[in-house]
Amino acid sequence: MNYRTFLIKYAEIGVKGKNRYLFEDRLCDRIRYALRRCDGEFEVTKSQGRIYVNADGDYDFDETVENLKTVFGVTGICPVVQLEDEGFEKLCGDVIRYIDEVYPDKHITFKVEARRARKNYPKSSMEINCDLGEAILNAFPEIRVDVHKPDMLLRVEIRERINVYSVVIPGPGGLPVGTNGKGTLLLSGGIDSPVAGYMIAKRGVTIDAVYFSAPPYTSERATQKVKDLAKIVSKYSGTINLHIINFTDIQLYIYDKCPHDELTIIMRRYMMRIAQEIAKKTGSLGLITGESIGQVASQTMQSLLATNDVCTLPVYRPLIGMDKQEIVEISEKIDTYETSILPYEDCCTIFVAKHPVTKPNLNVIRVHENNLDEKIDALVQTALDTDEVVEISW
Ligand code: ATP
Ligand code: MG
């Protein structure tokens, strides 16, 4: 079938009144943005509470669908045939041709579901269902009706023109990016944080990211891996401003001054502090991490309490209740997994203690942090001043 048009379905729950227009306009923008990666020219229009994507000329169907599947807010992508209203006889003929082409094997069940958005059509929805159903049964002897679980649910929408479709390709759901403020993702090269960024972007949040590198202990390849991960996430989230922070001197200084079993926690507290400064400066409304309770020593409830202690912004941890396997499944789905498992060193693993505390005492941590004196503030300031920002998009 040579489709010219896609009908885009989106969930409207909670999107009422003025917000609805903002939501729809934003969704159209995001669709246009995703389609700029495709061959071909497209027009994205809103009409009577529906969003349509029209192809002007040649385009690649599969590529177009793949890109539409990256747009949060889209719940379904329906390749649709749009017909002029030239009488019911003509409609029957066109629908029969449509079925013939889209369903080469006619050993299927079907149901017609007509809707009239235009009430001056000469037949009621019920009459369309019955009469069109009968025409289909007459045309294809093998086909059967099943009103409960049909293989083909044929939608016929009587509008200005008539929409005919039966294929609904699932979209990612969520809310269009840009409808819910901005968050700052602490992005490492691991499996978890890219997934966390994806999940928050899915709620309509624009994402910035911060990566802490520790040259020469971490390599340029490790940084490149994080850029590659940000790039994959940006396929869904749109452009990501990635802040690369040189964390080496801070880590070495902490290593020098603090008990080694508390190293990870104190380091994590400095990461949060720095990320928070960047977030505030760039208008982010919260931090995002890939933490999950109990996954490692630095993610026990006690450790999370100690890390969270330095944050005044909310910290969003979308993976908090997930098992590793569940996180891996999402990372495979969004295509970050293969990159995440590349074996490059991370700053946390290089300075990690043999036996890190699993139940840090917040008061003790605070006391030990005092050993760091003013020099740490200067190091933090230098790290912020030498922040390298890279704009990353798919
Ligand atoms: P991930 O798979 O995301 O690396 P992890 O299981 O390795 O997570 P940790 O190393 O304890 O867990 O890190 C917890 C969270 O802290 C990460 O999900 C990420 O949000 C943040 N983080 C850790 N290391 C870095 C880093 N080098 N740069 C930026 N953020 C980091
Ligand atoms: Mg990690």
Image (cartoon, rainbow, N blue to C red):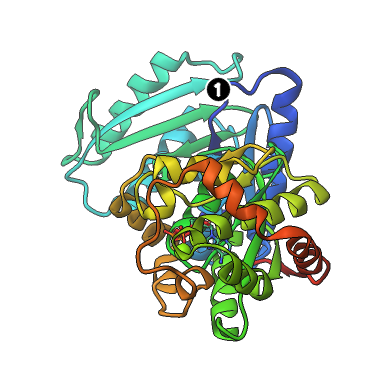
Residue type beneath disc 1: Ile
Q: Is residue 391 in view?
A: yes
Q: Residue at x 40, y 54 (%)?
A: 357
- In this rendering, position of residue 275 left or right of residue 73: right
x%, y% of residue 311? 65, 42
Task: Name the one closer to the observer, 6 or 173.
Answer: 173
Residue linked to disc 1? 13
Tell me which corner region of the image, top left, top right, bottom left or bottom right, holds residue 243: bottom right
Q: Residues within 10 Å of mark 1 (few under 14, many from 20)?
A: few
Find residue 187 and report its image quarter.
bottom right
For image coordinates 60% across by 40% down, the residue present is: 309
Give left or right: position of 354 versus 123.
Answer: left
Residue 55 appears in the rendering: no
Q: Position of residue 213 (x, y in %)?
A: 62, 73
Q: Quadrant of the N terminus?
A: bottom left
Residue drawn at x 65%, y 28% as measured from the top left: 49
Q: Nearer the viewer, residue 113 or 15?
A: 15
Q: Is residue 230 above or below residue 45?
A: below
Question: In front here: 301 or 72?
Answer: 301
At a point 52% along the width and 42% down the height, the residue shown is 362
Position in image of residue 149 (x %, y %) = 22, 29
Please provide percent x and percent y for residue 80. 50, 44
Q: Where 79 sits versus 156, above or below?
A: below
